[in-house]
Image (cartoon, grey):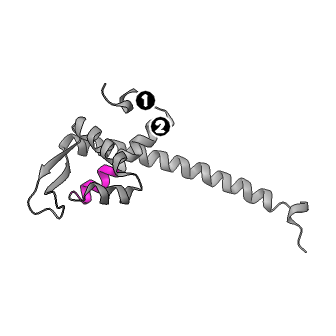
Amino acid sequence: MTRKESTLPPGSRQAKLQEDTYFRVMRILQENPDLTQRELAEKLGISVGGLNYCLKSLIEKGLVKMKNFANSKNKFGYVYVLTPSGMAEKATITHRFLQRKMDEYEALKAEIEALRSEVEKPGDEGTQKA
């Protein structure tokens, strides 16, 4: 194991955040393979160094590869492409990402309802009208 993320506990918050980052990187690369690392980092809201670390990990895992491409808008003449196994992994990660977001949505919805009922209770001192 050469990378720190290889040792993360599978269900840990950090592992989930890392998987979300991988998902977002692969999603953007699938749509825009010729983005520079700087452009991609800006789209993701992460540092270029953090993105570079992530890309290296995705490349090591065989999910993304860097190809020379003369017509790239990227001045260095390369593109990042998802490999067939990268596309399969992206589909798997997409499913888990969607499930996490749906769970977060349901939890948030329940919290909003609880807060609404607290605020709407008649006779509470904090909600009396002037």
From which residue to which does the magenta span run? 25-33
Asked whether, in this view, residue 42 is left or right of residue 100, the answer is left
Residue nearer the viewer, 64 or 4: 4
Please name the residue shown 37% across and 46% down the image: 50
Give the spatial CA distance, label 1 vs label 2.
Answer: 7 Å
The percent position of residue 114, horizontal first and vertical second, equals 72, 53
Q: Quadrant of residue 122?
A: bottom right
Quarter of the picture containing the C terminus is: bottom right
Q: Is residue 110 magenta?
A: no
- Mark 2 or mark 1, which is nearer the start of the sequence? 1
Query: Which residue appears farthest toward the left when viewing the image?
Result: 70
The percent position of residue 100, horizontal first and vertical second, equals 48, 45
Q: What label does residue 8 carry, if any?
A: 1
Element under label 2? helix
Residue nearer the viewer, 128 or 110: 128
Q: Quadrant of residue 79?
A: bottom left
Please name the residue shown 74% across and 60% down the image: 116
Is the residue 28 above or below the residue 54 in the image? Answer: below
Residue nearer the viewer, 53 or 114: 53
Amino acid type at circle 1 is: Leu
- Magenta-colored segment: predominant secondary structure: helix
The percent position of residue 81, horizontal first and vertical second, equals 19, 50
Query: Which residue appears farthest toward the bottom when viewing the image?
Result: 130
Residue occupied by mark 2: 14
Q: Is residue 27 magenta?
A: yes
The percent position of residue 14, horizontal first and vertical second, equals 47, 37
Residue nearer the viewer, 112 or 24: 24
Amino acid type at circle 2 is: Gln
